Image (cartoon, rainbow, N blue to C red):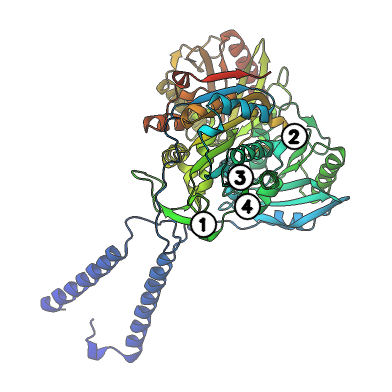
């Protein structure tokens, strides 16, 4: 059935005009906003998270806050840390709060707290482990916390703290510890030193504190994400073991095949699998060995050493560790 | 519905769709957004290179910056070869972060002060020390120690302000188009000297003198991090400096460009000075354990004719001060 213009009711016509008016309004707003385009804000989300509140309330004995502090979002993080922002953004950054405190009467003696809120504890562990300083001392404050001569770093739950002093002075180091303790009291408890599959690496011979979570594009391969690595000193060099739990065995198999193809595309020469590791991929890359495989839902391997025998021996141990984990 | 009415309505609907499409086409901005800084007139950046000083390079081994600077300038022909009486000299430092000088994330204040003094000593009428830092400018210049040191040595410290920026387009550039350039401190300058620390950089592997020109850009320049190698090579094309100095006396070897821990630094006892910024940076990346061929932006800059990565071809003067 159809209605001619004369048959349309007044209500229908008013309703039609209202809909058309609304569409015209939407078009006008879009046009107006386009003229005021701000590349700084377009397409970026995020707002200051809970971290800002934690630092806003934080008092450190013997130290005076220098101002109210600052907050940073994914859109503005690079305003604070420039190119290093990419490390955090790739891992799952949500917000960061920063605040400085100075020793009373000594403006040159100050410390800065930078509290990063990441998407989860794995993301926090990733940025913590990627930046672990050599020669760091265990702080004893938390499973993932260490000090250097002028700084303190820790990861707990979805938070990562960088506390940096302007000078390597005892009074400031004490301030770093006190600030960290005050913050830890507010942060969620952390049950273990490293999340998830990191605990599956063979403990014997592993370099202390060497477990790192690579959040994105590990070993230069796009899409090879969420990979744990651990270092094993071997003779004068080092072996690197790697491990990742995938959603299911098929995904682990696919990634092993993709990594083999990636290595081949980059000059790698595939070799027959070692007798003790059937089904594994062995690839020689410019004199160094890459040995990796899928085992249940795990993608695992050993890489980067010119010592083939040592590579195979560590691979055997890693395979056995995974068998124990998922009999 | 009869055929005539159907065709009439279909025609109207088609016209409506066409009108909306035409409106969208008309409103579409094919060029995309620029870093709009109002109606300011665009500028051209002159060359600050000094004729007759091309391809000079000096590598000074020393753990002390001030004597290394003096020896390096001497090796290049003396500060007088670059700065003369009545000159306005701009020193572009790296004051990117509000961090103490000991962390090595910013230009060393002692080095800045000595360079200012040397310029004034040979008759410069004005020495300007400037940067557009990543963090709050006033805090950066004060906490890095650069501001107080430069002022004490007789320089004018110029912080960024809205009036200092003018639109700039790099001729033939792909990234730097109609972008705000901190031109204010450069206006009327006779000489431009870049002074940067040697640093590890999470995105670009290394940050030295060419990356230091990033601090002349304004706007939301972090968008350039998505093409970090491209932007550094364009920065090298953008600026033809009188002289660049890379401070590798202590190199920020880890967790750059911010660092944070003193353990991120490594003593490398090297100051590099030259008029070829690609050559200077090529020497500098060696302090980070890199070869020039491993650093993409060096290759791009060399391809663009900014300078050479084969720094030995310049017969650098090498001095060991002990």
- Name the residue carrying label 3: B96
Q: Which mark is residue B137?
A: 4
The vertical placement of A232 against B156, above or below, is: above
Dot label at residue A193: 2
Mark identifier at residue B164:
1
Residue nearest the viewer, comparing A45 with A323 = A45
Tag 3 and tag 1, C-beta contact below 8 Å: no
Picture quadrant of residue A312: top right
- Indicate the position of residue B160 as horizontal and vertical percent values: 57, 54
Marked residue chain, label 1: B
Q: Residue at x 76, y 55 (%)?
A: A54
The location of residue A269, given as percent across then percent down, is: 43, 14
Q: Nearer the viewer, residue B77 or B104?
A: B77
Q: Chain of mark 3?
A: B
Please tell me whether mark 4 or mark 1 is closer to you in this view: 1
- The verdict on a common chain for dots 4 and 2 is no
**Label 4 – label 2 distance at C-alpha:** 39 Å
């Amino acid at each position: 059935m159809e209605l001619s213009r004369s048959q349309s009711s007044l209500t229908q016509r008013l309703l039609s005009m209202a809909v058309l008016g609304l569409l015209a309004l939407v078009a006008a707003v879009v046009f107006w906003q386009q003229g005021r385009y701000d590349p700084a804000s377009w397409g970026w989300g995020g707002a200051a998270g809970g971290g800002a509140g934690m630092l806003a309330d934080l008092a450190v004995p013997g130290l005076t806050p220098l101002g109210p502090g600052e907050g940073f979002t994914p859109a503005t993080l690079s305003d604070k840390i420039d190119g290093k922002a990419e490390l955090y953004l790739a891992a799952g950054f949500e917000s960061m709060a920063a605040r400085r405190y100075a020793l009373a009467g000594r403006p040159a003696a100050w410390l800065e707290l930078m509290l990063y809120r990441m998407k989860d504890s794995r993301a926090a562990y990733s940025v913590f482990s990627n930046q672990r300083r050599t020669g760091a001392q265990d702080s004893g404050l938390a499973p993932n916390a260490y000090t250097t001569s002028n700084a303190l770093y820790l990861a707990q739950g979805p938070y990562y703290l960088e506390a940096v002093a302007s000078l390597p002075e005892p009074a400031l180091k004490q301030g770093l510890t006190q600030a960290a303790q005050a913050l830890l009291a507010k942060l969620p408890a952390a049950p273990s030193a490293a999340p998830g599959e990191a605990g599956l690496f063979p403990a014997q011979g592993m370099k202390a504190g060497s477990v790192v979570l690579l959040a994105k594009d590990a070993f230069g391969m796009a899409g090879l994400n969420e990979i744990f690595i651990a270092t094993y000193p071997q003779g004068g060099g080092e072996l690197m073991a790697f491990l990742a739990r995938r959603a299911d065995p098929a995904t682990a198999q696919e990634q092993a095949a993709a990594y083999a193809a990636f290595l081949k595309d980059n000059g790698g020469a595939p070799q027959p699998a070692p007798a003790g590791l059937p089904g594994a991929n062995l690839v020689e890359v410019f004199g160094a060995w890459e040995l990796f495989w899928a085992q249940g839902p795990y993608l695992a391997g050993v890489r980067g050493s010119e010592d083939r025998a040592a590579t195979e021996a560590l691979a055997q141990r890693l395979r056995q560790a995974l068998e124990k984990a998922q009999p | 519905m009869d055929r005539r009415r159907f065709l009439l309505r279909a025609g109207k609907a088609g016209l409506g769709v066409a009108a909306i499409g035409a409106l969208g086409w008309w409103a579409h901005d094919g060029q995309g957004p620029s870093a709009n800084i109002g109606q300011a007139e665009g500028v051209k950046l002159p060359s600050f290179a000094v004729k007759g000083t091309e391809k000079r390079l000096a590598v000074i081994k020393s753990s002390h910056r001030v004597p290394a600077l003096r020896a390096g300038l001497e090796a290049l022909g003396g500060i007088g070869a670059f700065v003369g009486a009545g000159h306005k000299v701009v020193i572009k430092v790296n004051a990117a972060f509000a961090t103490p000088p000991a962390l090595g994330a910013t230009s060393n204040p002692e080095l800045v002060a000595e360079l200012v003094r040397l310029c004034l000593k040979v008759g410069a009428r004005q020495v300007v020390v400037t940067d557009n830092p990543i963090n709050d400018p006033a805090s950066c210049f004060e906490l890095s120690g650069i501001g107080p040191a430069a002022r004490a040595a007789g320089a004018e410290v110029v912080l960024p302000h809205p009036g200092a920026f003018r639109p700039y387009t790099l001729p033939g550039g792909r990234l730097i188009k109609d972008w705000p350039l901190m031109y204010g401190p450069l206006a009327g300058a006779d000489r431009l000297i870049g002074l940067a620390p040697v640093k590890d950089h999470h995105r670009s592997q290394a940050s030295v003198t060419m990356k230091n020109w990033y601090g002349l850009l304004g706007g939301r320049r972090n968008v350039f991090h998505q093409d970090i190698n491209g932007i550094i090579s364009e920065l090298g094309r953008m600026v033809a400096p009188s002289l660049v100095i890379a401070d590798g006396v202590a190199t920020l070897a880890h967790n750059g460009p911010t660092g944070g821990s003193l353990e991120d630094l490594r003593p490398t006892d090297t100051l590099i000075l030259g008029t070829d910024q690609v050559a200077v940076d090529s020497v500098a990346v060696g302090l980070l354990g890199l070869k020039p061929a491993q650093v993409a932006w060096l290759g791009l800059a060399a391809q663009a004719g900014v300078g050479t990565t084969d720094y030995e071809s310049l017969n650098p003067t090498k001095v060991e001060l002990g």
